[in-house]
Every structure is written in C-alpha cells, then in structure tokens.
C-alpha cells in the first residue's frame, strides 16, 4: 500500500504547488523539491532490501562481488544523477541539469575504464607478440 | 566439469543482474552508458576462464585497478587529503630532523677535532660523528626523540700522528723515514660488541703488521687517550669512539 502513500503525497504536493504557484513561485519550487526528496527517501528503504537480496543471490551463485559492486555503483550513480538533474530542471535551470547528467555519465564511464583495461590486456595477451 | 558449471552460473547471474539493472534504470539518457558498462562486465565474465589461464584472476585485478583509481581520485580531490597532508608533514619533519641532525653532527665533529688537537697536538684528519635518535618523553609528555651520539670515528692523519707519537713517546725521528706508511691501526669498537671483539680486532691488525708493532702500540696508546678524552668531555662511552690511523689507507674491518 505504499504506492498509495506515494501517489497521495504527490497529488497533495501538486495541488499545493498549483495553488501557491500564482502567488509565490519560489515556494512552489521548494515544495516540489521537498516532495521529490521525500519520495526518494521513502524509496531508499525499498531499494536497500532489493540490493541486499541481489547480494545474497550473487553470493550464493558465486558471482564475483566486484562485479556486483560495479553494477550497484552504476545504479546508484544513475539514480542520484537523475534525481538531482530533475530537481534542478524543475527549477528551470536546464543548463545545470544537463551538467549533472554529464557528470553522471562520466562517472559511469569511469567505472568502465578498469574493465576495458583488463579486457584489452587479455586480448593483447592472446595475440602473438 | 565443476569449473564449467561455475562459469555458466556466473554468466547467467551477471546477465540476469544486467537485465535487472537495465530495467530499473531511471532514465533513458543514461541508458547507453550503463549498457556499455554492463556489456563490458558480461564480456569480462565470459572471458574469465581464458583470463584465468593467461593471467591472474580477473576480479582480483579489477579490484586492484579500482583501488588504484580510487587512490588517484582521492589524491586529486580533497577526499582523504588530510591523511595525505599529514603524511607529507611527517615526511617533511623527518627530513628536517635529519638535516638538523647532520648539522649537529658536523658541529660536534668540529669541536671534537679542536679538542683532539689541543690535547695531543695531532691533527685529526677527520672526525665523523653519527647521531642516533632515542625514543623518550618530551617536555610536554608526548613521545619525543632525544638525539644521542651513536658513534665517533676519528681518522688520524698519517704524518701528524707519527709526529705526535714522536713527541709523546720520545722515539727517534729517523724511524719515521724507514717505517712503512701503510700500517693502519684500527681500533674499531662498536656499541654493541663486547670488548673481546675489539681486542680480537686489535690482535689481528697487529698480527698482520708485525714489523710495526712498536708504532702500533704507540698509536693505540694515543687512540686510547683520544678515546678517553672524548669520552670524558662528551659523556659518551669510550667504546663508541673509533680511532683510525691514516686517512689514505684506513680500512674497514
């Protein structure tokens, strides 16, 4: 029934924002940001259960933990960057939002660098020198 | 066959995880990048048996690479910078301490040289002082290090040593000319070894140069005098003082 809570929160926040927006656009933005943070926080607990379950599965099936960690890092970076970018975008700062997304993308690419390095090294070792 | 089943399990799990991650990704904008990393991971898993043959385990390597990377980024950004700064400070402090110790050692050596010259007129060609650090308590109760004289090496100049020996022992000066200059008397006494060691050394050196026994004894007397003098004035054990004869052919035992 959590979805009802979330949707209710969202609806109330939307109505309030609509009411306030005419008089004080500033407060409307603050309200939107606070609602976003609240929903995000609410989902944190759920995500943690999912992640712990994933970890358990990975452990039981013998997947290397470093792979799982990499994957989880990717999810985390993607979510946080997305959330921040949306909040900023709501405030009308399209530029900063795109910069945040760029940062997220680059950080994900950074995670890929060691993997690429190892793969290339292996391939080069395969080739006769 | 166990490795095959393990590998298959791993591949299946990684593919499932990747699909799952793809599903829960928040936005399309990140999709391409995330997909690239995930496909690389799957490739790595597929290649892992090959890598086990060729190189070390992939996951160990990956962890090492990540560690290196984290260290790099942490050193670049402010994260963990405090530790780095502290390390640098420690290094600088050590450097400074070493420099000041060297300087102090030089000063002490100069003073000792003067004293030796005053005492028996012989010019000490070289006085080397080695300072050590002793763990102790500082004034403010914190652990501090107190410098102490670890060892003193006195190298006597050949001619001067011989000349001073003349004045002291009263042997005739014609001996100077005939005596082979190569007769290093080395009284080497370290801090730790017992006296027996030193006497062994002395015995061996005198045994090696039997023709110059008289001179040896004279010089060792002088050496003893220098040692005693230095020990009294500087408050160090006479055993710590090493007196070597002849700057050119002084040899280490």
Image: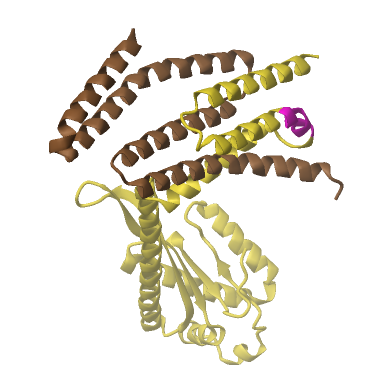
Chain colours: A brown, B yellow
Foreground of the two, B26 or B217: B26
Q: Residue furthest right?
A: A128
**Where is residue B22 shown, x and y percent of the image?**
55, 26
Please tell me in which quadrant of the rendered image residue B162 appears.
bottom right
Residue B144 image point, x, y percent = 29, 51
Residue B102: x and y, percent?
41, 69
Residue B193: give x, y in percent of width and height: 52, 52
Residue B237 in view here: no
Q: Residue furthest front?
A: A22
Dominant secondary-structure state across the stretch colored magenta = helix
Residue B49 included in the magenta stretch of the image: yes
Taking the image as shown, residue B241 lies to the left or right of residue B17, namely: left
**What residue do we see at 67% from left, 33% from top?**
B58
From the viewer's perspective, is A108 left or right of B45? left
Residue at coordinates 36% horizontally, 18% vertically from top-left?
A: A45
Assign the N terminus of chain A to one quadrant of the image. Answer: top left
Q: Is residue B8 left or right of residue B109?
A: right
**Vertical position of residue B8 compared to residue B72: above or below:** above
- Give the answer, above or below, for where B217 lies relative to B43: below
Residue plotted at (42% across, 85% down): B121
- Membership of B11 in magenta stretch: no
- Provide the residue span drawn in magenta: B46-53
Which picture quadrant has residue A48?
top left
Is residue B79 or residue A104 the one in the foreground? A104
Visible residue check, residue B144 = yes
């Amino acid at each position: 029934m959590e979805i009802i809570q979330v949707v209710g929160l969202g609806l109330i926040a939307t109505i309030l924002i609509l009411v306030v927006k005419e008089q004080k656009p500033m407060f409307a933005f603050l309200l939107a940001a606070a609602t976003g943070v609240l929903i995000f926080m609410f989902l944190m607990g759920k995500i943690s259960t999912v992640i712990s379950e994933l970890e358990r599965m990975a452990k039981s099936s013998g997947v290397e933990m470093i792979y799982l960690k990499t994957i989880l890092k990717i999810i985390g970076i993607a979510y946080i960057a997305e959330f921040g970018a949306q909040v900023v975008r709501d405030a009308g700062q399209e530029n900063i939002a795109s910069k945040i997304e760029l940062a997220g993308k680059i950080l994900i690419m950074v995670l890929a660098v060691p993997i690429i390095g190892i793969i290339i090294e292996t391939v080069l070792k395969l080739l006769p020198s | 066959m166990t490795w095959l089943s393990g590998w298959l399990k791993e591949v299946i799990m990684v593919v499932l995880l990747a699909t799952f991650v793809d599903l829960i990704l928040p936005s399309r904008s990140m999709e391409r990048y995330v997909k690239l990393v995930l496909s690389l991971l799957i490739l790595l898993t597929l290649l892992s048996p090959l890598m086990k043959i060729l190189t070390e385990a992939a996951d160990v390597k990956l962890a090492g690479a990540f560690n290196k990377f984290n260290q790099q980024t942490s050193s670049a950004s402010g994260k963990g910078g405090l530790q780095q700064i502290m390390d640098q400070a420690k290094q600088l402090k050590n450097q400074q301490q070493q420099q000041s110790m060297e300087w102090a050692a030089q000063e002490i050596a100069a003073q000792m040289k003067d004293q030796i010259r005053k005492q028996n007129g012989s010019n000490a060609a070289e006085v080397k002082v080695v300072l050590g650090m002793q763990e102790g308590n500082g004034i403010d109760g914190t652990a501090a290090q107190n410098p102490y004289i670890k060892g003193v090496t006195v190298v006597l100049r050949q001619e001067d040593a011989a000349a001073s020996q003349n004045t002291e022992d009263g042997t005739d000066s014609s001996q100077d000319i005939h005596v082979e200059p190569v007769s290093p008397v080395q009284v080497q006494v370290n801090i730790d070894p017992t006296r027996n060691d030193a006497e062994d050394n002395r015995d061996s050196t005198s045994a090696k140069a039997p023709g110059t026994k008289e001179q040896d004894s004279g010089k060792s007397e002088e050496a003893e005098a220098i040692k005693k003098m230095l020990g009294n004035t500087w408050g160090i054990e006479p055993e710590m003082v090493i007196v070597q004869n002849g700057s050119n052919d002084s040899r280490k035992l």
